[in-house]
Amino acid sequence: MNDKKEFVRTVLGDIDPKEMGVVDCHDHLIKNGGPEVEEHIDFLMIDINAAKKELQNYLDAGGKTMVTMDPPNVGRDVNRMLEIANDFKGKAHLIMSTGFHKAKFYDKHCSWLKTVEEDKIVAMMVAEIEEGMDKHSYNGPVVERVSAKAGIIKVGTGYASIDPLEQKSLRIAAKTNLATGVPILIHTQLGTMGLEVVDILLKLGVSPKKIILSHLNKNPDKYYYEKICEKGVFIAFDGPDRVKYYPDSTLAENMKYLIDKGYQKQLLLAMDAGRFYYQTAYSETKGHISFGIAYMLTHFVPLLKQIGVSQDAIDDILINNPQVALAFDNSKRG
Ligand SMILES: [Zn+2]
């Protein structure tokens, strides 16, 4: 049977992974509310024109594909994202996410993540991936699916611990991966619990090639990274332009360390510019000058080159590795 063709699932349909070009593996264009916005108003990003301009800046810098990692209930806006995707048809590929964030963002007693049986939530996730996303992002009580499907499942874990609700969402993500082949991206809190998350998913039967760990850059420990790379999974370093945590050089040098150790096939890059002032175009609407998503290509990649990272490694990180990490696992699909 030839439905074994490799594909990645974008908002506008399945494509050959080779069509993705340069990929930003974890980002945000729109966030329409949810618990992050309760924490800080900067997380609210609902200006379609600003989002389009930001995406265009990224394309102008050489980008082509963006994975937007907003799960249902945490700012995902199917309608606005569809409008953007349609506007950039033939120019950019957008991938959207289903799944979960960290347990902190869910009511421990009465959220659907808590009360609904595990296998029923797996069915909800599979439907988002195989039938179409709920345009209300499971904010309930009505589910209305659009034709656009989710192309990745997110799971969140907390700082230095994995809550029971997070363990449940990890099991759900694994079962959803086994049913559909969908890749899994994990929000680690400040880069902690990465090894433990990987062990849980591997034990449940997920291929290491479909596991992407995010935010490890916030725990800038190259020996820890090495241990994780030994497991065969991907690390999405998503933190250039975040001097409040560490300078770019820390991330660049740690990446070079891993490349020199032979792990260039397991590294991915992203900006995770999930706040209003992390983006150039949103900032401009308030008269601010700031860097944005294009920074990954205009500033950070040149820094990698400056410290001696080869073009071959950069091509792997930006183009070739995402083709493996973001493709659906055909061995898991009937
Ligand atoms: Zn993010």
Image: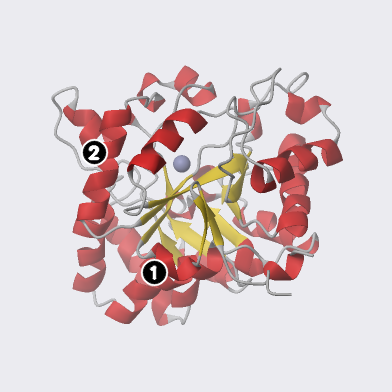
Left or right of residue 17, residue 115 in this image: right
- Amino acid identity at mark 1: Ile
Which residue is at 44% across, 70% downward?
Answer: 18
Which residue is at 48% across, 29% downward?
Answer: 79
Instruction: Decide if residue 281 is in sight here.
Output: yes
Sequence-first tag of 2 and 1: 2
For mark 2, what is the residue? 53
Task: Return the mark for residue 319.
Answer: 1
Instruction: Decide if residue 279 is in sight here.
Output: no
Where on the picture, by quarter, is residue 44?
Answer: top left
Of 72 and 16, nearer the camera is 16
Of 148 and 223, nearer the camera is 148
Q: Is residue 332 above or below residue 162?
A: below
Which residue is at 78% across, 48% downward?
Answer: 171
Where residue 34 appears, as percent x and y from the top left, is 53, 22
Give the CA separation, mark 2 to mark 1: 23 Å
Where residue 16 appears, as percent x and y from the top left, is 50, 67
Where on the picture, by quarter, is residue 243?
Answer: top left
Element class at badge 1: helix
